Image (cartoon, rainbow, N blue to C red):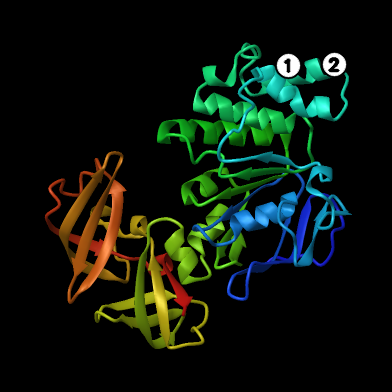
Amino acid sequence: MEGAAHGGGRGLTVSDLTRRYSDQVTVGPISFAVSEGEFFSLLGPSGCGKTSTLRCIAGFERVDSGAIWLDGRRLDSVPAHKRGIGLVFQTPALFPHLSVAENVAFGLRTHGVDKGAATARVAAMLELIGLPQHGARMPSQLSGGQQQRVALARSLVLEPPLLLLDEPLSSLDLKLRVQMREELRALQRRLRKTTIFVTHDQTEALALSDRIAVLSHGRIEQIGTPEEIYKAPVSRFVADFIGNSNLIDAEVLGFADGLLNLTTTSGLQLSVAQAKPPSRKNVTLLIRPERIRIGSERGRCGNDFTAAITDMTYLGEDAQYRLLIEPAQSLLLVRKSGDQELPFTGAGTLNVGIEPNDIVVLER
């Protein structure tokens, strides 16, 4: 796990942060470092501690132990209003009686920026978020996505060294959420603003982040790039939380020449490419549904089976097939719904293969 012993250099450093709510409920200790200009996500289910961590960084929650550093300055004892951090929440929380331009300019006025400079900065920010002609409108005249863009501009106009985003897209409908996701990432890349993004949506985290910290029960399970988190999860929790997965309990039978031979609890025999044997005999196997090979792509995989299709779920662009391999191993297969090698009816049999390199061994 990545940690940090001190707060030297640019960017954010969180070192052994702990927040205790009771003897039974504690967040931390949590340690991570975010480089200047990085888009870093805190990802996990409800109650895992991601929002509490964000609130500690913002100064809205006290830190019971540990330290927070931003650009070499220690923050954990600094009042929230003196930290100079930009915040955007799930709801835009715009002032309904102020125009768009007045909402964006609000923080500038409270910081004593003169009117001429404030007007110029607001105009530049509205141009940046793609709403240059909307300054005179009231928040009620904007769509949900436009309101969220104004909330983002209100935070960015103060040029904060750190931007905290607490599930800012979750209240939007799916199509608008995808559009805003693309706009947010493009804006962050243009500004190179150090950003921490809190979400429970793994698709958002994978699409937006330079790196992701996956949290569970107040602790960080894994930190890595989206590809590392998806392809090489370090625990069953991470494997299950990120993407679709086949998780299968198995027992090690032997290891030779870089191949681990196992049997699943259903009796299926599998070979897995492994540099060394695991420390325990009982393990969990991860097989991503899109890595199961079928038909002409199968070749000779080393793990070749005949599977019965027991169910099919049509999801528009994709289709999910439930397979059954004798004696009793169920697997999920995901393919584009137009794949000519799969029956659309959700019935029949398939020849399937699983490459030994496509199976991840997770120690329990």
Image coordinates of residue 166 in percent, x first then y, are 60, 45
Q: Residue at x 23, y 55 (%)?
A: 321
Q: Which mark is residue 115?
A: 2
Image coordinates of residue 223 in percent, x first then y, are 62, 61
Q: Is residue 21 left or right of residue 242?
A: right
Q: Residue at x 80, y 16 (%)?
A: 120
Q: Residue at x 81, y 41 (%)?
A: 84
Residue 250, located in which quarter of the rendered image?
Answer: bottom left
Q: Is residue 91 above or below residue 11?
A: above
Quarter placement of the N terminus: bottom right
Q: Residue at x 64, y 30 (%)?
A: 151
Which SS class for mark 2? helix
- Marked residue nearer the N-terminal end (1 or 2): 2
* Residue labelled with disc 1: 123
Residue at the far front in the pictured view: 97
Q: Between residues 12 and 226, which one lies in front from this camera angle?
A: 12
3D distance between C-alphas at marks 1 and 2: 12 Å
Residue 67, located in which quarter of the rendered image?
Answer: bottom right
**Amino acid type of the residue tagged 1 in the rendering:** Ala
Using the rendered image of the protein, determine whether residue 34 is visible from the camera's viewpoint: no
Q: Between residues 138 and 267, which one lies in front from this camera angle?
A: 138
**Amino acid type of the residue tagged 2 in the rendering:** Lys
Q: Label 1 crowding class (10 Å Cα cut-off): few <14, some 14-19, many 20+?
A: some
